[in-house]
Image (spheres, rainbow, N blue to C red):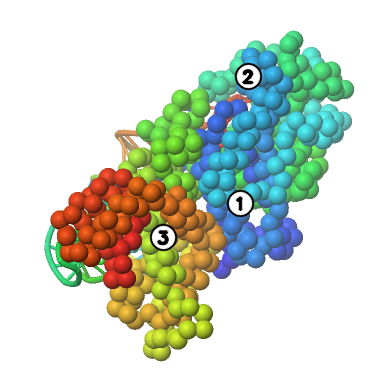
Amino acid sequence: MGLHLYDTMRGRVEPFQPREPGRVRMYTCGPTVHGRNHLGNFRTYLQEDLLRRHLEASGFAVTHVMNITDVEDKIIRGAAEAGVSIDQYTAPHIEAFFTDLRRLNVLPAHHYPRATQYVPQMLQLIERLVAAGFGYPAEGSVYFHVGAFPHYGALSGLPAAGLQAGASGRVDSDEYDAKEEVRDFVLWKASRPGEVAVWPSPYGQGRPGWHIECSAMAMALLGETVDLHCGGVDNIFPHHENEIAQSEAATGQQFVRHWMHCEHLLLAGGKMAKSEGNVVTVEALVARGVRPMVIRYLLLSGAHYRRRLHFREEELEAAAEAVDRLVGFWRRCAESLPPAGGPQDGAGPDLLGAAAQRAVARFQAALDDDLNLPAGLAACFDLVHEGNRLLDRGEASAAGRAAALDGLRTIDRVLGVIEVAAGEVAVASALSPEEQALFDTRERARADRDYGRADALRADLLRLGIAVEDRPGGSRWRRV
RNA sequence: GGCGACUUAGCCAAGUGGUAAGGCAGCGGUCUGCAAAACCGCGAUCCCGGGUUCGAUUCCCGGAGUCGCCUCCA
């Protein structure tokens, strides 16, 4: 059926059609590198990663750009307080951001443009807007005249007349002195005394406004029209609304063909946000021993991307169990494969191979339907269930087991969880000498039929976080 | 004040105009020295009240509750 996506502008699910067949230009709103990004931010980045992976699995050549906002009020203030340049101030935050992305197995974007490196392009765009009558300088700043752009509000559905200035409590009123209208937004901000981030411009010393960076960098790297523009729902207004206005006012071209927005992650009933002070970071969870793939799984599958997701401890545990079930079946298929060139068994109908094919088809169809990963995972778990059943009964041929593993790999190229999670178990897990000694001692006790001692040792190992499973071919363990 | 979203089993969560996927947890069983894992079996008047319809969880209206946005937050 091909990929169908919900488009924020049109408000419905519709076929996704890039401008150039087979090629997708994708721009995703990245982090403001001030403080550590939290799970809510990463939920959005992960959903975008899922989209990117599904596009590539579907045969599209994707060019993915994610901006890094490295100049902004809080950064400037933080740098000033620390007495360092903004580059020095943001460097560790940028590093931490990439560390978390790697931990979560997010495919790197092709470009990570930084706002501070695109100031000339932003100024060019501002000059075009001023020349065209959409921008006006005032007291060293430049503002966008919203009233001059008739389609303003189309994305967010907020009628210009219905906007109640200051209703959200986010307005810093003294910034608006020079504006002609309250809803006008700033393209270029005049420097204030003592600010560390300053660029020369035709309007005087200053720095770029927030929205202009995304327009300038998207156009510089992807052209005047991008196929996909993604971000969190809180960017719909004003950020993306303003991007459309300033971009289309400057070029006369459609800026974005398809808008995708990820819903919020909630904690304790409210939005997770730095400003709310209810933030959980990847770093904090990892420090507690939560496996990164469990975090990825939860943020991807906890709810469809257009639904709010409540972050809860119990769900983290449930996610860990679900990941273990997927990994368990993956390993079971991998381990039961005969050596290459060995004898093939099970000449009968290849039920497992057929089940794998069905699962892959269902998974792909589910993702084609507006990235319905919960439905896709249902297909995946059905394969696990059917596969385990056939393996238990000895009804899975070697070809079937290979097909099941192959099907899981196909799914996991999009999901991005199972193979890495299997590796997490193996890597994080090498037993310490003490643990190995306990394990070996227990094996000997079992061989001696000293079950009382074996059970005691098993309980000891479990307290150390190692679950032992006795199986026909010998005991084995896994971290829990 | 304006705009909008959501409400499905103990928890999380898909989905459909013809009585509802999947995951976690729980209970019983098979297997096991005992466990674990896996497998078999067990669970829903789909927030409430109207309406449309042969038939609504699914469409419409009203209500209740929860939440988001209304200028620099993913």
Q: Are marks 2 and 1 on the same chain?
A: yes
Lower position in the chain sequence, tag 1 or tag 3:
1
Residue labelled with disc 2:
A78
| Chain that bears disc 3 | A
Q: What is the secondary structure assignment of the residue under circle 1?
A: loop
Q: Quadrant of the N terminus of chain A?
A: bottom right
Q: CA distance from mark 2 to mark 3?
A: 44 Å
Lower position in the chain sequence, tag 2 or tag 1:
2
Query: What residue type is disc 2 on?
Result: Gly
At which x and y percent is residue A332? 39, 68
Residue at left offset 35%, top offset 47%: A434
At which x and y percent is residue A222? 76, 48
| Chain that bears disc 1 | A
Please give the count of numbered marks on the rendered protein: 3
Q: Is residue A33 visible?
A: no
Residue at left offset 72%, top offset 35%: A114
Residue A307 versus residue A172 in the image, above or below? below
Mark 1 neighbour density, 10 Å: few (under 14) some (14–19) many (20 or more) = some
Quarter assignment of residue A330: bottom left
- Kindly identify which numbered label has been placed on residue A315: none
Query: What residue type is disc 1 on?
Result: Leu
At which x and y percent is residue A322? 37, 55
Residue labelled with disc 1:
A107
Q: Report if the CB atoms under discs 1 and 3 are less than 8 Å apart.
A: no
Residue nearest the observer in this picture, A151 or A383: A383
Query: What residue type is disc 3 on?
Result: Val
Q: CA distance from mark 1 to mark 3?
A: 21 Å
Residue labelled with disc 3:
A327
